[in-house]
Image (cartoon, helix red, strand yellow):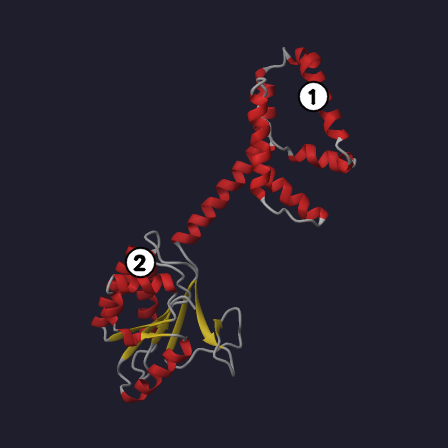
Amino acid sequence: EVTAIGRTFAYMKDYQLDDGNKEMVALETMNVVGSLTSCYVATGKLKNKLAADLYSCYQTAVSNIVLSVVVLLTLEFMTPLFKYTPNAILWVIYALNVKASLVHFVSISFAKILLQVTRPRTAILGKIPRTTVYRNIQQYPEASKIPGVLIVRVDSAIYFSNSNYVKQRTLRWFMDEEEQEKGDYRTKIQFFIPLTDIDTSGIQAFQELHSSLEKKGVELVLANPGPAVTDKLYASSFANTIGEDKIFLTVAEVVAYCSPKLVEDPCKIYMNFVVGE
C-alpha cells in the first residue's frame, strides 16, 4: 500500500522513486522502534495522504508533528467517547474500507490472469503486403493469408496449465483447415507465435501433437525458439525427434523452405511452429 501510494504521487508530482525497498525499510524500522513502546503497527494511508496533499500540509515536516499530537490527544481523551459504540457499526466501518476493496479487485485480477494462462488467446495471422511481417488478420485487414498456409499465434507460454488446451486447439484448427481445403492441391502450414517458455508438460504436448500430425503426413517445423525453449527442446531430445534441420530463424525462412515442396509434393502437408519470435 505504501509503495502504491508513493508511485501514485510520484506520477502526480512528476518525480521518480529510486528504490521501493527504501520505503519498506523505513516503514518497518519505524514499526520495530515503535514496538518498544507498545505502539500499533503503522502504515501509510491513501486517504490521509490525499487530504494532506489537498491542503498542502506536506510542504514542511511540521505537519507530521501536528498529526502526531492530534493522534495522541485523540487516543488519550477521545477514545472513551467510542466505548459504547455498537460493534456492528464498528464492523461496517472496518469492512467497507479501502483494504476490502483492494482485496476484492486483486482477487478479480488473479482470476483473470489464471483464465488467460489456462485459456490463452489465439489469432490467425496474415502477411502484410510488401513485407515479411505477419499480423492478426482481424486487427490488420490488409494482412492476407498465404495460399495453403495457416498461421496461428498463441499469446502465452505453454505450461502444464494450458498444454492440453493448446494441443487440442491446434488439432481443431488443423481439422477445420483440412475440411476447408479438402480436395485442394495446396499444402497447409501452421505456425505458433510466440512461445517464450515451455515446461515438461508443454514438451509432452508437443510430442503427442507431433505423433498425431505425423500419422496424417504433416511435417512439424520450428522457427526462432528462444534460448530457454531451445535448451529444453534439446534436453528432452524433442529437437532430435523432429530434426535439427527443421528449426529456423524466421517465419520467412520457414515459408521459403516449404515453398519448393509445395510444387514438388502438392499432396504433403507441413505444419510449422514459430516459437519465441
Give amino acid for label 2: Gly
SS at circle 1: helix
- Report the disc number at residue 266: none
Which comes before the other along the chain, label 2 or label 1? 1
Quadrant that contains the N terminus? top right
Using residue 237 as the reference point, say whether residue 226 is left or right of it: right
Three-letter amino acid code at the position of disc 1: Val
Question: 62 or 13, which is in the foreground?
Answer: 62
Residue 138: x percent and y percent?
50, 69
- Answer left or right for 213 relative to 89: left
Residue in the image at 27% along x and 65% along y: 234
Q: Circles 2 and 1: CB distance less than 8 Å?
A: no
User: Mark 2, mark 1: which one is toward the viewer?
Assistant: 1
Do we see residue 72 in this rendering?
A: yes
Residue 164 in view here:
no
Give the quadrant of residue 255.
Answer: bottom left
Q: CA distance from mark 2 to mark 1?
A: 57 Å
> Which residue does the numbered mark 1 point to in the structure image?
71
Whether residue 18 is situated above or below residue 148 in the rendered picture: above
Query: Residue 63: percent from the left, percent from the top?
Result: 75, 30
For the C terminus, the image quarter is: bottom left
Q: Which mark is residue 202?
A: 2
The residue at 30%/61% (across/down) is 232
Horizontal side of 75 relative to 187 (left or right) equals right
